[in-house]
Image: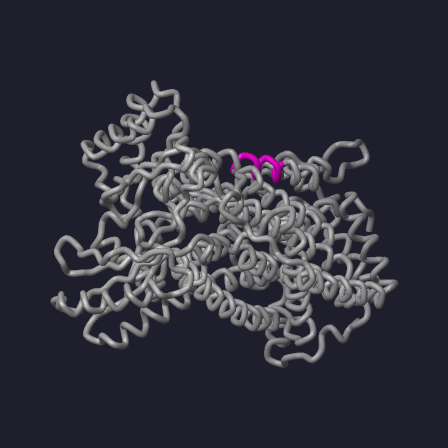
Amino acid sequence: MAVHNPLAGLSLKAARWSATHPWRAILAWVGFVAVSVGLAMAVPTVNADGEDYYMGEWGRATQMIEDAGLDNPDSEVVLITADGDLDQAKAEAAAAELTERMRATDGVDAVAEPQWSEDRSALLVSVQLARDQEDVTDLQAVTEDVAADHTDLQIGQAGDNSVDDAINDQVADDLSSAEATSVPITLILMLIAFGALIAAGIPVLLAVTSVTATMGLTAPLSHLIHAEDTVSSMIVLIGMAVGVDYSLFYLKREREERAKGRTTLDAVEIAAETSGHSILVSGFAVIASMSGLFVVGGATFNSLAAGSILVVAIAVLGSITVLPALLVKLGRWVDRPRVPLLWRMNRRIGAGGISSRVLAPVVRRPAAALVVSVLAVGALAVPALGMKLHSGSLETLPTKIEEVQTLRAVADKFPSEGPAAEVVVRGGGDDARAALDQVQEAALETGRFVSAGADPIRTSKDGETSVLTLAMPYDEADDRVDRALETLRDDVLPPVLDDTGATYAVGGGAASSYDMVDHLNSYLPLVIGFILLLTMVMMGFAFRSVPIALVSTGLNLLSVGVAFGLITLVFQHGWGADLLDFSSPGFVIDWIPMFVLVVLVGLSMDYHVFVLGRVREYVEAGMPTRLAVRKGVADTAGVVTSAAAVMVSVFAIFATLSMMEMKMMGVGLSAAILIDATVIRLVMLPAILVLLGDRAWPGRPKDARGEQVAENDPGYALV
């Protein structure tokens, strides 16, 4: 078989070396994984910190506050309530005990006097920690002891540190549960796909070792690109999907060639030139897609991009090196031991047995199939037009976490403890500091802000920087928070502060969310264009066909639309909320669409490239386009179904986890890939290819006169 592409030549050379030096290749892979794990143990991981997340006006305000030494130390609050009417005497006694014991606790800077809610149904004790104090376990122990002594009261503690600790514990539990579930489910799916234990275990083994090696290498990589907390879950998510898929494509083709009577070595070489080429093209497409996250910038997206690119590159490396070596050493033992029922079922169904029934009407009536499928997919994508983005808030945190319940109750009983804006003024002398009093008065007159306490203005020791805190009487996710910030920035501040000569900016938690959403809304169209253009160029280069590149880009865009539409329906509008055990926050968490976009485009290219590669083989062999499409799609349908089943299963596990971000990722990716692998790639793609005919393959065989042969010409050689 001739090599038509440099990538195919690369995969073939790698496979030949590995096949002729199998033990070297296997030991090299084992050594690589071991060294990677050793690096993780020897090199400390550098986690992203506050400065890595700064962006927009909020970032400037936060930096000004830190430079002036005005950043507040962490704090915790203890809320005292009751099931029915609150006994005020008992509540005050509990608060007094809490205050006394917490003031005596190490790491506590100050404890404020207990504060009653407006309706006197709740009592709040605020605790300010010493600077750089993060451990709150001693405070939590005090709260638990006092709660045990006052069983007729409800006493709960919450704060940035305690909530973060609880969330981290919950995420760790969720991820360990997902990892423990995904591996056996993937193994079961591989058993169904192959009907033999060794064949089923190889893809899972490659995926697990790829993920393990990546986890190890992220430690030294974090010194260049600081690691974000969510990167480990993303590595598992992507690594299991691509690692299994790449092995599946390769192994299926090798078994197919052996079934035709070829030797194991010849079968491995053919698989390297065909499936290996598809793996390289797909891997580069995934990497190109993930690189779009670097365009957005910021700690979260840079970390996710680095981790995903690394795990895909390692999975590709394993697929074209250690996988051929394993197949050569195992030979026909790869089909042992067989699972009798599953083995017979695979043989009975054969290649494309089920898909042929779907493909037959599509190939016969391509125009009708295309119209119906476009209408169906378009209907699922339409809700994305109304998608609303917002940063994660209390509404998106799991209610099963006690600290989250406490924070929600605090925000309800004490509005001043809700979202706040911080007006930072640097320079301008006494005029600027005096102007903050006017700013506060003007802000309160708008009706969108409330007083943040008796002393809302704090000034640095050198007198150069002052900060005014303004509270908002709304929930974090309320649209009125954004309107309040816009009023403050556009209408209140300029008339008062522009003439003072001071530098000013608005920060605070609410501003952080607002600026992040604004940043993502600005970059989302750019990233979509970047990814689609880059993958279009890659597909055009890989298949030497402009129509194929355009079709691939269009189908990717449809897949993204479906994902966005489904996420909007489920999480913004609450469809299926009871089934997935969550309460709709009324919005989509801001970074989810960007992440789903790059992951979906990258992963859907796996089987897209695999299908097109097989169709092109038949076209280059001289088969009529219509028949090449039908046979190519049918022959690869089983592999595509298995690959999609793995992705859908792994992502669906994330939809069952507690964290809303995980649910959104899981639902968006699993549902979109299911539709992409069936309706889009099994109906729309073949329909478009049949309608394009020879125009899709400008390099197809020509007759002796150098003219392209018509599809109905009997001179075509059928394979």
- How many numbered discs sit on the rendered protein? 0
Determine if the magenta segment contains residue 530: yes
Residue 627 visible somewhere in the drawing: no
Q: Position of residue 479 (x, y in %)?
A: 28, 41
Task: Answer with the quarter of the image where residue 464 lies.
Answer: top left
Q: Where 247 falls versus 509 (above or below)? A: below
Overall secondary structure of the magenta section? helix
The reply, left or right, for residue 592 in relation to residue 97 is right
Residue 528 visible somewhere in the drawing: yes
Determine if the magenta segment contains residue 48: no
| The magenta segment | 528-536
Q: Position of residue 76 (x, y in %)?
A: 34, 58
Q: Position of residue 591 (x, y in %)?
A: 45, 46
The reply, left or right, for residue 367 in relation to residue 570 is right
- Residue at figure coordinates x 22%, y 76% from the top left: 151
Depth check, front residue: 366 or 575: 575
**Which quadrant: the C terminus?**
bottom right
Task: Answer with the quarter of the image where residue 109 lies.
Answer: bottom left
Depth check, front residue: 576 or 207: 207
Q: Position of residue 96 (x, y in %)?
A: 23, 65
Q: How is the image coloured?
A: one colour
Residue reaching furthest right?
A: 20
Depth check, front residue: 35 or 151: 151
- Residue at figure coordinates x 25%, y 62% from the top left: 79
Q: Where 413 falls versus 696 (above or below)? A: below
